């Protein structure tokens, strides 16, 4: 049945048209009525009619305004205009909108019936053409999915050429573009189809190629390769406009010369998509693109000269945790981002993939958070926010987004650094030693974090405390060990608790500063 909408501000006319015309016997059904153009706009969205009988003169929004709004919005329905004699010339303006006809009031049922028959033929013809186009499109999408399969290319290239010819895909050149919507899991099954529909007018409507869906991707097969950066940027903008608010990554597999090579272009685009985490944002990715680092970024240079031990991943991680913890603990905000960049450079140099890097940053930041919570004079204020942050690490689409988010969160944990200067730095350093004496503290590391040379900081420290750094640290550790031993702790346990992994070394240090062994102290 062909659905009809009657739009007229006269209730009697609306009712009369519904009862006087044998709609069903003519192949029509009255789906809805409306009293003016504004009301009709809402009805159209709900009922999707095929034909509208529209009065010219109506309050709020007249018939011509309604037709103009609907045609400009892309609705493909047919229109028959109803007008009074005085509006006959005015009604002719509707010809530019492609109306199927117009009738004078009072409506002659025979004339309207004849007009409806003509409209029905037009609608049925359009439906037939649309069904044919849809069938052709389905066949071409099926053919494209065959071409995209690299295994088919290897099996029988000649068969793929015949398939492309039959599906009207036999072109001189090809280029595959893959778009992956980045949406929540619940939307992943529908997102590629929605994007595909939005892209069809841009691609197929302009004769540039065809669009298909191959979950989790929307696929564009171009018949003319993209030439140069400008064309790639233009296509990316068109994809972004079609995607609306949906985030996505898009990649080209490069131009190929035959249908049997389309699968290779598709594979290249897939590989580029997999490397999107390491690539530049907001651009069409390309095969074999190296990882992107902004100019003058620490990431751009640090991979060639890492400051962390590469041969021992555990040692490198502990070193990173220590540096970040110390910088946050003393309020040295300027060191956080360089340390995160250094960590990323090390993980890249170790050959970690996206999953590995996210896991490494999860371990790193989780350890820093726990150390801050355990050693801070004020506990972690918002454990829920920390949980959200840690979980969010796995949802970051780009390495640079991940680093920015970690940087932002860690800065929110940093204590205010207070007034600067050497005196303040030394106070922070001494305070840190008394709270973290059991850690693997080294003057060289602390100097780097405070932006001093180790020799200069060592001299400042001696001037302030009267002792060298290592001597001061040993005295703090031995003093704490004495407390533990007096409470009955075993010697090896006390040694480990205060930061000595070698018991014999602990014995020698204890005897040096106390004049007797820890065993003697434990059992006076």
Image (cartoon, rainbow, N blue to C red):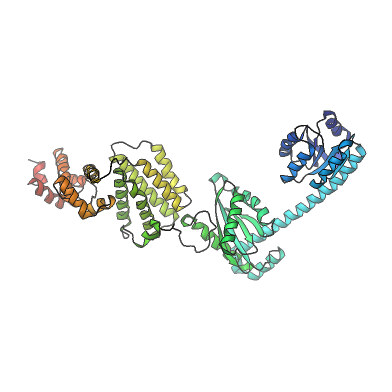
**Residue at 53 percent of width and 61 percent of height:** 286
- Most distant residue in the bottom direction: 158
Q: Nearer the viewer, residue 42 or 168?
A: 42
> Residue 216 location, x and y as percent?
57, 53
Q: Nearer the viewer, residue 140 or 241?
A: 241
> Residue 212 location, x and y as percent?
64, 56
Quadrant in which the N terminus is drawn: top right
> Residue 127 location, x and y as percent?
78, 50
Q: Tell me if 424 is positioned left or right of 266 in this view.
A: left
Quarter of the image for residue 416 reads top left
The relative height of residue 55 versus residue 121 in the rendered view (above or below) is above
Q: Is residue 23 visible?
A: no
Q: Which of 457 and 502 is in front in this view?
A: 457
Quarter of the image for residue 202 reads bottom right
Q: Is residue 395 visible?
A: yes
> Residue 151 location, x and y as percent?
58, 65
- Most distant residue in the top direction: 12
Marks counted in the figure total 0
Quadrant in which the C terminus is drawn: top left
């Amino acid at each position: 049945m062909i659905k009809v909408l009657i739009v007229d501000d006269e209730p009697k006319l609306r009712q009369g048209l519904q009862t006087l015309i044998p709609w069903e016997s003519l192949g029509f059904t009255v789906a809805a009525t409306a009293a003016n153009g504004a009301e009709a706009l809402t009805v159209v969205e709900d009922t999707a009619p095929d034909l509208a009988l529209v009065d010219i003169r109506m309050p709020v929004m007249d018939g011509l305004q309604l037709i103009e709004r609907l045609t400009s919005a892309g609705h493909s329905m047919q229109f028959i205009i109803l007008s009074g004699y005085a509006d006959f010339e005015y009604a002719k303006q509707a010809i530019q909108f492609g109306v199927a006809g117009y009738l004078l009031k009072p409506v002659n049922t025979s004339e309207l019936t004849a007009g409806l028959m003509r409209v029905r033929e037009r609608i049925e013809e359009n439906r037939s053409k649309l069904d044919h186009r849809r069938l052709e499109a389905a066949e071409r999408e099926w053919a494209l999915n065959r071409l995209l399969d690299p295994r088919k290319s290897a099996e029988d290239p000649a068969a793929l050429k015949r398939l492309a010819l039959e599906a009207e895909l036999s072109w001189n050149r090809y280029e595959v573009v893959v778009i992956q919507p980045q949406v929540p899991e619940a939307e992943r099954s529908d997102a590629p189809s929605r994007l595909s529909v939005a892209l069809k007018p841009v691609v197929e409507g302009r004769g540039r190629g065809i669009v298909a869906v191959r979950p989790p991707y929307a696929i564009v097969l171009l018949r003319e390769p993209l030439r140069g950066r400008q064309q790639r940027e233009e296509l990316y903008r068109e994809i972004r406009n079609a995607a609306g608010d949906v985030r996505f990554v898009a990649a080209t597999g490069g131009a190929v010369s035959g249908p049997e090579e389309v699968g290779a272009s598709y594979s290249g685009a897939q590989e580029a998509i997999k490397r999107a985490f390491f690539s530049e944002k907001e651009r069409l990715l390309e095969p074999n693109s190296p990882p992107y680092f902004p100019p003058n970024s620490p990431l751009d240079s640090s991979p060639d000269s890492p400051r962390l031990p590469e041969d021992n991943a555990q040692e490198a991680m502990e070193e990173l945790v220590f540096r970040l913890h110390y910088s946050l603990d003393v309020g040295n905000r300027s060191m956080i981002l360089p340390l995160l960049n250094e960590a990323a450079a090390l993980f890249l140099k170790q050959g970690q993939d996206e999953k590995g890097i996210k896991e490494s940053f999860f371990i790193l930041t989780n350890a820093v958070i726990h150390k801050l919570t355990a050693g801070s004079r004020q506990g972690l204020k918002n454990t829920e926010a920390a949980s959200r942050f840690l979980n969010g690490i796995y949802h970051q689409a780009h390495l640079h987004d991940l680093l920015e988010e970690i940087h932002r969160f860690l800065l929110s944990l940093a204590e205010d650094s207070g007034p600067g200067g050497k005196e303040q730095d030394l106070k922070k350093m001494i305070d840190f030693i008394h709270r973290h004496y059991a850690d693997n503290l080294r003057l060289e590391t602390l100097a780097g974090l405070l932006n001093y040379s180790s020799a200069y900081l060592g001299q400042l420290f001696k001037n302030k405390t009267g002792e060298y750094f290592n001597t001061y640290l040993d005295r703090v550790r031995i003093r704490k060990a004495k407390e533990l031993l007096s409470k009955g702790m075993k010697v090896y346990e006390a040694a480990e608790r205060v930061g000595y992994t070698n018991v014999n070394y602990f014995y020698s240090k204890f005897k040096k500063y106390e004049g007797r062994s820890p065993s003697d102290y434990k059992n006076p």
